[in-house]
Image (cartoon, rainbow, N blue to C red):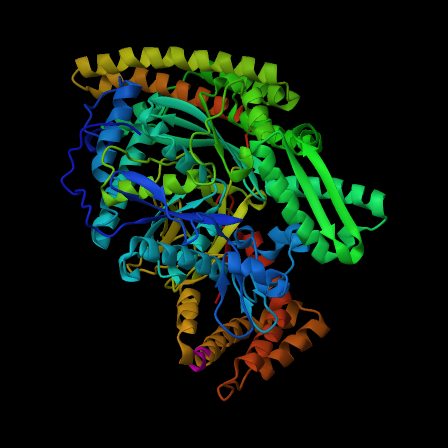
Amino acid sequence: MIELPIYGQNFSADESADPILGIDLGTTHSLVAVFQHGEARVLCNEDGEALLPSVVSYPVDGAPVVGQAAIERSRLDPKRTIFSAKRLIGRGLDDLAAERATLPYDLVEAEDREMVKIDLGDRLITPQEVSAQILAACRDRAVKQLKLPAERLKRAVITVPAYFDDAQRQATRRAAQLAGLEVLRMVSEPTAAALAYGLDKKDAARVVIFDLGGGTFDVSVLELQEGVFRVLATSGDTHLGGDDFDRAIMVQVAAEIQQQSGIDVLADPAARIALRLIAEKTKKALSASESAEFVYHDPSAGIAFRKNIDWRMFQTWITPLVQRTLNGCALALQDAGLAPEDISDVLLVGGSTRVPLVKAAVAQFFNQPASDELDPDQVVALGAAIQAGVLGGSVRNALLLDVTPLSLGIATAEGTVSKLINRNSSIPAQAKEGFTTFVDGQSAVKFTIVQGERELAKDNRTLGEFILSGIPPQPAGLPQIGVRFSLDADGVLHVRAMEERSGVAAETVVTPKHGLTDEEVETMLADAWENAEEDLVTRRAMDLRGQLKNVRHAVAKHMDIARARMDKAALERLQDAYEDSEDVDDISDPNPLKGILDELEEAANPLAELLMNQVATETVRDRKVSDLIDE
Amino acid sequence: MLDPFQLLNLPRGFELDDCVLRGALIKASLLWHPDRFALGSKEEREKAEDHMADLNQAFTMLSHPLQRAETLLALSGFALGEGTDQTSSPTFLMEMMELKEDADDVLKSEDADRIGQMRRRIQEDIDQRVEQLKNSFRAWKAADYCPGTLTPLRALLTEAVYLQRTLDGLQVTTLFQS
């Protein structure tokens, strides 16, 4: 960022305008801050607590409970109390294989796309809905503290991790939408931290942001040059944080209790929770003083344990954990192509950086003291509020110019990637690329949108598939399909395709595989109103009948190929499924319709493969269209 | 075609200081970045988003000297690579083929020192041609942009572009870790 005279005419600071919320939507805690009277401040609840636990509990009857109250329900109702929704947002079940085992609640795969849902037992909810509850609680806190009606607190800046991909960013945006908040800007967490520390006032800096929270560790290397923040590298460990420090104390103490009394206290869930809480208190005490007393009494089990823990013991126990964070720092530096001495500033973020050993280890690694003037829990939220101040016009001399961390492109027929927007491009960015069809009369083209740096499409992350249909019949190669990528200032991608030659414009917008369609968001919003259910059933049945019609049309069209080339059993199954799906207009219940559709689709799979292979042999080399479908 | 010089309010020419270019982008961004219209109407925001994307693209087109040279030729209607371009000498093409083979070998060796050495060598060759390009552009301007004086300039640029491609191919892709 740079300070320059402003020539603009289009903005003026208006202190009476509605404040824009700066929200740090964290894995374990969330915070809300505002920029008012020339400074950013975090809003607390009635008890003076700034941290809102990112936990939502769903009682069987009654409204969802958020925050500390939800934590208190967790023991009662572990399967209906959702922690760590941020780990799930915008992700599919495949991405979460390792995560799943550690969660007390159940995950299921959603039907059509791969987006994960949470099974409460009597209903499914999405991670977006959970995050929406947390965001709404943040807004409610602002309503109380600022004494403003909710209608005046509808706009927010929300922070996301630097490594969040397009699907995760879009899902976060949807969560805000569900909470009735308009996201004016999403800012990456390390950039927000750099803003909070006022690094934007420097001409050039290379900054390491060391963020050790309750359950996650992120380290980012940012380069700041005349107003532009670039994320050079990020690394970390999604399962490393202060909770592990608590666990280290608990395990040591439990071993000693067992030695003294012969009782395995960790086997008892209630005792385990009690020990964890005492361990956490001990850890916090050790950040301020040289030693702390660990006291645990359980008269019913005959345990009376008392131990003085000094910082040396604690240091020994957590050294392996701290070493892991340093390994992460080394990896991030290596990725950025930098050495520790190239770093001009080191910022500490996250409550666990209060532990003196962590602070000392980071300072030693980078050979300079790390900045800890701001409350490490609040840094990111404060940065979000400053950005909110920029957007609201209160902060006049700052402008955040961001870059996209990953390249975006389209998978080609050869399995490579045609890049439209390169990594490190300043955003917003737009790019256009021309494509055409392979076969005569082809009416639809399917594009696969990928994000990443690898050469082969399969090694990158697939963001979504995108079908342009309704192309008027023309000889192969004649249609001119312009695909336009627009990456907005939040790093969210919009894709449009248009067939230009015929003058008949067909246009659509990408649907991320792990995200929600606009329709789904509408559906969820509608769900909040009570009597919407019936409409939904009807609409779903209509959608399914429409899909059935399309599949039947495709099957009928290629029946001669099916007869000639499919094996007998598969052909019979297809013919049966085709007949069974003929009369569906009377069926109003979506469930049997879905069954019929699934069967037909499955039976038609071998035929689709045959057609695909046929297309592959007809493919002209070096054409870029990834794939095609035929209606 | 988008004229990046006009968009960024810079004089059209090959010689352009990095700081001047970056300053031009920042100056334009302060006026046009969508954040400046965060509270504006939807139309205003979309317009700002589009315009800022153009500005960013203009910046990219001018930030690398070879791309800047190609842009200048294209703006004058003499874009490189269109039509038959017989400007490169056969000797140079032979050299390039050998260089490409060497580059493939070095890359396969996965020896960071050797890769680094070769990258530096190619970069020097490119830098040398960029220096020569400055003179060529001056000569072209002095000849009042007469197309006849373009042949040596185009040959030089084509060579530099070949070298740059080889250099780009010599990069070990660093991946974004998450």
Q: Residue at x 31, y 25 (%)?
A: B68
Q: Residue at x 26, y 30 (%)?
A: B26
Residue A177 is covered by the magenta coloring:
no
Q: Is residue B79 left or right of residue A571?
A: left
Q: Is residue A405 above or below residue A445?
A: above
Give x and y (percent) for residue A444.
44, 61
Q: Quadrant of residue B157?
A: top left
Q: Is residue A156 visible to us here? A: yes
Q: In the picture, which quadrant includes the N terminus of chain A?
A: top left
Q: Quadrant of residue A563?
A: bottom right
Choose between A618 and A222: the one closer to the eye: A222
Q: Is residue B122 left or right of residue A242?
A: left
Residue A533 is covered by the magenta coloring:
yes
Q: How many marks?
A: 0
Q: Is residue B70 visible to us here? A: no
Give x and y (percent) for residue B36.
23, 42
Give x and y (percent) for residue A136.
40, 59
Give x and y (percent) for residue A115.
54, 59
Choose between A370 and A335: the one closer to the eye: A370
**Residue that sits furthest to the bottom in the current view:** A586
Q: Which residues are magenta?
A: A532-536
Magenta-highlighted stretch: main secondary structure? helix
Q: Residue at x 49, y 66 (%)?
A: A64
